[in-house]
Image: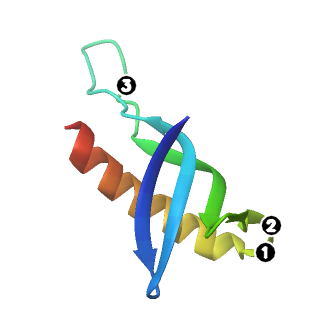
């Protein structure tokens, strides 16, 4: 499980989940996209994923992907 910390709406959140770097396309293979699938959203010491709206979770996944891919590449 991968972890990254982001600040969302002035609140520090720790996002834990699975990061997939994807891959470029080859002659016979289609490219695979990068993604970050959130499993936990920790604020303080509490996992708050169950109280967040799906749209917010998607936005957090995009922010995590941006931050995490910056560290990996």
Q: Residue at x 46, y 44 (%)?
A: 35
Find disc 3 in the rendering and name its residue. 30
Residue 28, position in %: x, y?
Answer: 33, 12
Q: CA distance from mark 2 to mark 3?
A: 34 Å
Find disc 2 in the rendering and name its residue. 50
Q: Residues within 10 Å of mark 2 (few under 14, many from 20)?
A: few
Asked if labels 1 and 2 touch by Cβ distance under 8 angstroms, the answer is yes
Q: Earlier in the sequence, mark 2 or mark 3?
A: 3
Residue furthest to the bottom in view is 10
Q: CA distance from mark 2 to mark 1?
A: 4 Å
Q: Residue at x 39, y 41 (%)?
A: 34
Find disc 1 in the rendering and name its residue. 51
Residue 21, position in %: x, y?
Answer: 36, 33
Q: CA distance from mark 1 to mark 3?
A: 36 Å
In this view, 70 is above or below 10? above
Q: Residue at x 46, y 38 (%)?
A: 19
Asked if labels 3 and 2 touch by Cβ distance under 8 angstroms, the answer is no
């Amino acid at each position: 499980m991968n972890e990254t910390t982001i600040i969302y709406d002035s609140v520090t959140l720790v996002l834990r989940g699975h990061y997939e770097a994807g891959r470029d396309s080859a002659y016979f293979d289609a490219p695979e996209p990068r993604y970050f699938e959130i499993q936990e959203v920790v604020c303080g010491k509490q996992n708050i994923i169950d109280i967040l709206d799906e749209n917010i979770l998607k936005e957090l996944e995009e922010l995590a992907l941006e931050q995490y891919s910056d560290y990996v590449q």
